Image (cartoon, rainbow, N blue to C red):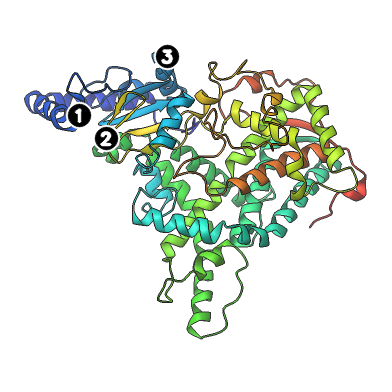
């Protein structure tokens, strides 16, 4: 779960409102005490015996509201406050009770492996949060749906039909066209608009166009259209809210108050996304249904939307409803945007700040690919040092402070601690990647640390031992790790091959590199073409 710079309600106002609610509840003290006793007596029954394992250490909660008052008083980042509670325990794990939910935060790789490897089946569900409700159109998509038939159905669809190797292969041409458009866009800005570039905007435009081409067979993000800007900002906002700590997720009875303003913001953001997606999807569904009704030969799918619409069940009926198609298309669009762009931006920032690393990375690209053609996907596996740079960026500068929560479907003991049913388990991307017990000089960008993988072993962007998190893992893991790897590597490799990068005169990267927030100020760099003019593609 990440940090958000959303225009939330005043923290002081939220605290006062919550305290008023607490006072109202405590006015019924006898009933409150009885409910509290019953909660402990029955909900936490397995932990009442002195022989039973304890909950993980953490702050002492208030009755009913838990540690919510402390959380909402945080003026900068609720995520970093939760992470600080883990650091206080010095155990690599903490239990922070928010409302009646036990939030289990983890920074120890050993404990993380026990959660998502030893007990993966127990923690394979998702929380039914306000943001997931909106993003998944009522928890219909593979990411938002809790453990059950809907998740199993959508997981099977995405893994075996949508993101399978065959489908991704026939989408290769679209990906390469967008990689060429990326280089062409930067080249034009260098030649026409000057050489100072907002790297984040370029990376997001690349990701947006790439995924829009693969899903809708359209591209539109050129940075000049206000509607495109509105759409991208809506996706950013939605991703921030999916990764946020929302009060009503832990005390659903308060959702109507919208204490932190999340629901109002989410409603607007999803409305913008739906405005862009729904007409395209409705028209495409209508077209496919007409073809089937008229018994015309079924056309070959052109994109992932066609794949979703054309799926049939055992009776020859559409496998997915229109709402399921819309939910999954939106999810795919959002999932493809941020992680790859964030890793490439941070990797480039770190590489440019250390000339010896920059030279080594560029030399590798020149040695493997040369200067007479552009990097292709087939080249990426040979760029071991560039892969190590990306891997180090994932470790040091993760997209979010925490991974998306895993929810326990039963009581279980993990690493000697009692984890109640319904707990939200958060693996800290930031805490794992910067754990000084795991990493030597964890705050330094050192790609070489990832090259000692054994003779002839490729450098993977994934980390099986959970010493950091690049792509989510386990049963609820990312179904498109290979695709995410290719997109991230292509983005950074084309950056390095096509252009000489430097810090604009009078500026510095020092403050940028010290940030722990993925929403920090965008990276601005000076770019100059480094290849012969004929190598740069002239796309429309």
**Location of residue 509 (image quadrant):** top right
Q: Furthest-front residue in view? A: 455
Q: Which mark is residue 411?
A: 2
Does residue 456 appear in this view? yes
For residue 404, above or below residue 311: above
Q: For this rendering, which residue is in front, 442 or 26?
A: 442
Whether residue 361 sits left or right of residue 40 in the image: it is right
Q: Secondary structure at mark 1?
A: helix
Return the x and y of residue 254 as percentages of the image width and height. Answer: 26, 36
Q: Mark 3 vs mark 1: which is more N-terminal?
A: 1
Circle 1 packing at 10 Å, graded few (<14), some (14-19), many (20+), is some
Q: Nearer the viewer, residue 15 or 80?
A: 80
Does residue 245 appear in the picture of this structure? no
Say if mark 1 contacts mark 2, CB within 8 Å: yes
Residue 233 position by quadrant: top right
Q: Which residue is mark 1?
A: 46
**Residue ID for mark 3:** 90
């Amino acid at each position: 779960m990440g940090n958000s710079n959303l225009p939330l309600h005043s923290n002081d106002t939220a605290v006062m409102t919550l305290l008023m609610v607490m006072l109202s509840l405590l006015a019924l003290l006898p009933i409150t005490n009885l409910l509290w006793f019953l909660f402990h007596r029955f909900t936490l029954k397995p932990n009442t015996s002195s022989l039973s394992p304890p909950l993980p250490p953490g702050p002492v909660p208030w009755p009913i509201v838990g540690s919510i008052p402390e959380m909402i008083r945080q003026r900068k980042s609720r995520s970093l406050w939760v992470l600080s509670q883990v650091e206080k325990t010095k155990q690599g794990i903490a239990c922070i009770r928010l409302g009646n939910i036990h939030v289990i935060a983890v920074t120890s790789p050993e404990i993380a492996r026990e959660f998502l490897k030893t007990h993966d089946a127990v923690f394979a569900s998702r929380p039914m949060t306000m943001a997931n409700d909106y993003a998944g159109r009522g928890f219909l998509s593979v990411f938002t749906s809790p453990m059950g038939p809907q998740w199993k159905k959508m997981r099977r669809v995405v893994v075996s039909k949508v993101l399978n190797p065959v489908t991704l292969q026939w989408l290769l041409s679209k990906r390469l066209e967008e990689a060429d458009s990326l280089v062409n866009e930067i080249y034009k800005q260098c030649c026409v608009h000057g050489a100072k570039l907002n790297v984040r905007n370029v990376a997001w435009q690349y990701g947006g166009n790439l995924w829009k081409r693969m899903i809708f067979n359209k591209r539109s993000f050129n940075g000049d259209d206000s509607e495109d800007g509105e759409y991208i900002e809506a996706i950013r906002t939605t991703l921030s809210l999916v990764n946020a700590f929302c009060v009503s997720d832990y005390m659903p009875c308060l959702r109507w108050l919208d204490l932190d303003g999340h629901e109002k913001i989410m409603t607007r953001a999803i409305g913008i996304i739906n405005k862009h997606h729904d007409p395209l999807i409705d028209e495409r569904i209508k077209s496919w249904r007409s073809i089937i009704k008229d018994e015309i030969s079924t056309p070959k799918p052109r994109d992932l939307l066609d794949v979703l619409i054309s799926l049939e069940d055992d009776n020859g009926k559409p496998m997915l409803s229109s709402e399921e198609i819309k939910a999954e298309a939106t999810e795919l669009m959002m999932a493809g945007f941020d992680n790859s762009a964030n890793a490439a931006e941070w990797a480039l920032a770190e590489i440019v700040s250390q000339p010896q690393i920059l030279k080594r990375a560029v030399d590798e690209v020149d040695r493997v690919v040369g200067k007479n053609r552009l990097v292709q996907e087939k080249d990426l596996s040979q760029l071991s040092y560039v892969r190590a740079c990306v891997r180090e960026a994932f470790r040091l500068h993760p997209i979010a402070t925490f991974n998306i929560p895993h929810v326990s479907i039963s009581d279980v003991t993990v690493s000697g601690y009692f984890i109640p049913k319904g707990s939200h388990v958060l693996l800290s991307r930031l805490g794992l990647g910067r754990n000084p017990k795991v990493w030597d000089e964890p705050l330094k960008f050192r790609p070489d640390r990832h090259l000692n993988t054994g003779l002839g072993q490729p450098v993977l962007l994934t980390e099986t031992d959970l010493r950091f998190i690049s792509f989510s893992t386990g049963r609820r893991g990312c179904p498109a790790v290979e695709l995410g790897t290719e997109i991230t590597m292509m983005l950074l490799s084309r950056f390095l091959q096509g252009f000489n990068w430097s810090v604009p005169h009078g500026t510095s990267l020092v403050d940028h590199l010290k940030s722990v927030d993925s929403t920090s100020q965008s990276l601005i760099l000076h770019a100059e073409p480094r290849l012969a003019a004929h190598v740069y593609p002239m796309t429309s």
